[in-house]
Image (tube, rainbow, N blue to C red):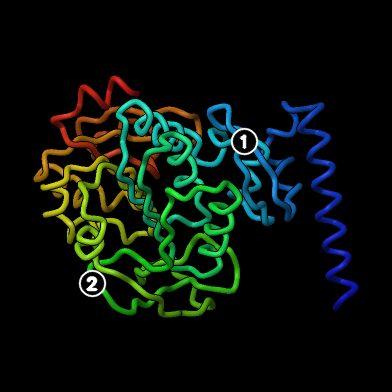
Amino acid sequence: MIDNKINNMSKRKARYYIGLILKKFLPSVIKKQFIYSRLSFTKVVSTDIDGKKLFFQCHAEEVSNTIFYTGVFGDYEGQSLKIWHDLIVKLNIKTIMDVGAYSGIYSITAACANEDAEIHSYEPNPYAFNLLKQNCNLNNMAIINCHDYAVAERTGELEFYNFGDTYSTGMTSVNHRYVEKNISISSFKAKGIFEIRKEINKKIELIKLDIERAELPLLTHAKKLLQEDRPIILCEVLDETDYVDYQGLLESLNYGYIQINDDDHTHTECESMLDHGDQSVGRNWIFYPKEIKAKILSVL
């Protein structure tokens, strides 16, 4: 067992140095996914954002590996991260919730975009939360408040599916059709979103929601908060079948929609979520109060 562990460490170290050499001398080659996806490793590395050095823990998985090789605005939700960053900078957004923070790339990008912001990051998965804390500490980002619990409709213990002893991003509180039956169910702490809003005690200006199909129930429950605070929302939507319900909720709130296509780094303003033409279904969307539509479009 010890020999296997040493052998795996040696392989990861070799992949790092191969990737580093290719990144320096053949950058156009290393940015090809079929190449960099085979060169994962475990190590603290750095990249640049806004001319600042950004440190993060690479740990042989897709998110950090992709960011190391292609940059913050590269192949891992690059367009979504660019829009998130630009909204914070150009609208001077200061009160931010990152719900489903995972290892913290959205929170760290927000901190780089506005050093005066107050950022609240929520991640109930203990493995991911540990990475989130590591990445915030590596960058001395005290403006990021890390919370090791889920944002939910109520406070208490919440069952999660697809939880294993890995850094998997697929943990979910919704027992949907993609739940893997061979992966365990675990209970973690959750706090009601209205209780969280009371604790923050400020108008929420921007929310990122990436909670694996639990987004729509949470937004529906939080309708009063959305009516009062009018936050901009960056939301993952995994199922096209939910578009009708999303649109009904958002129309009742007088919200508009922008579909993000991270595959080709584009975004599209939509009159209707149901009217996405020949485009592929967008995983990430911007939902915004229509009274600030001109501001939103001026940023994008």
Task: Identify the image quadrant of the C terminus.
Answer: top left
Image check: 232 left or right of 107? left
Q: Residue at x 86, y 71 (%)?
A: 4
| Up-down relation of residue 55 to residue 148 (above or below) | above
Q: Residue 54 appears at what percent x and percent y?
A: 60, 40
Q: Residues within 10 Å of mark 1 (few under 14, many from 20)?
A: few
Closest to the observer, 137 or 173: 137
Q: Residues within 10 Å of mark 2 (few under 14, many from 20)?
A: some
**Is residue 196 shown to the viewer in this render?**
yes
Q: Residue at x 73, y 55 (%)?
A: 42
The amino acid marked with disc number 2 is Arg
Tell me where residue 233 sits by quadrant: top left
Q: Residue 215 appears at what percent x and percent y?
A: 30, 56
Q: Which mark is residue 53?
A: 1
Image check: 66 left or right of 107? right
Determine the secondary structure under disc 2.
Answer: loop
Q: Earlier in the sequence, mark 1 or mark 2?
A: 1
The amino acid marked with disc number 1 is Lys
Tell me where residue 269 sits by quadrant: top left
Q: Residue at x 20, y 27 (%)?
A: 293
**Is residue 238 shown to the viewer in this render?**
no
Q: Which mark is residue 154?
A: 2
Image check: 134 left or right of 206? right
Residue lying furthest left: 252
